[in-house]
Image: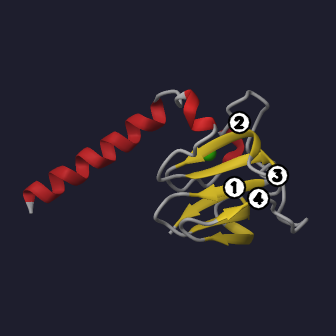
């Protein structure tokens, strides 16, 4: 049991470190493994940002190309994580939401009430 807990701690530490360093350039084409990657434009284009866990407020999350906040500007997304993810229109996981299964990609968030209105992301 002690070994299992130690391994989990290493995995968590690795995840935290990966958030702190700049994404390698190849991650723009390929998607960061084990993450929810969101895009500013449809068809997985424009600025992008990857999440590896829940985030209750996207105001402070910025697009990789310096075009501002991810909040209320997501148009497409890919889920390469092993988790089902909820993308909610309100901060704090509130309001109408989209459910994205593991491995699912959405090239265009077509619902006008949701497109460019996502404000929080919940990993289940
Ligand atoms: Ca945030």
> Which disc number belongs to residue 42?
3
What residue appears at the point 81 percent right and 62 percent down from the top-left corner? 109
In front: 102, or 54? 102
Check contact, mark 3 vs mark 1: CB within 8 A: no
> Which disc number belongs to residue 39?
none
Q: Which of marks 4 and 1 is nearer the N terminus?
A: 1
Q: Earlier in the sequence, mark 2 or mark 1?
A: 2
> Which disc number belongs to residue 77?
1
C-alpha gap between disc 4 and disc 2:
17 Å
Q: Residue furthest left?
A: 2
C-alpha gap between disc 4 and disc 1:
7 Å
In front: 75, or 94? 75
Question: At which x and y percent is residue 107?
Answer: 76, 59
- Taking 101 as reference, is 77 above or below it? above
- The residue pinned by badge 4 equals 107
The reply to whether residue 101 is in sight is yes
Is residue 52 found left or right of 14 in the rendered image? right
| Label 3 packing within 10 angstroms: few (<14), some (14-19), many (20+) | some
Q: Earlier in the sequence, mark 3 or mark 1?
A: 3
C-alpha gap between disc 3 and disc 2:
14 Å
> Which disc number belongs to residue 63?
2
Ligand 1 location (quadrant): top right
């Amino acid at each position: 049991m002690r070994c299992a807990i130690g391994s989990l701690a290493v995995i968590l530490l690795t995840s935290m470190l990966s958030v702190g360093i700049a994404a390698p350039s190849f991650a723009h084409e390929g998607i960061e493994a084990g993450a929810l990657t969101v895009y500013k434009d449809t068809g997985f284009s424009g600025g992008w940002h990857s999440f590896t866990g829940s985030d209750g407020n996207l105001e402070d999350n910025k697009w990789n190309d310096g075009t501002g906040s991810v909040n209320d500007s997501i148009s497409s997304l890919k889920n390469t994580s092993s988790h089902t993810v909820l993308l909610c229109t309100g901060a704090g996981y509130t309001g109408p939401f989209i459910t994205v299964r593991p491995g699912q990609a959405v090239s265009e968030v077509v619902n006008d009430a949701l497109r460019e209105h996502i404000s929080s992301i919940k990993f289940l």
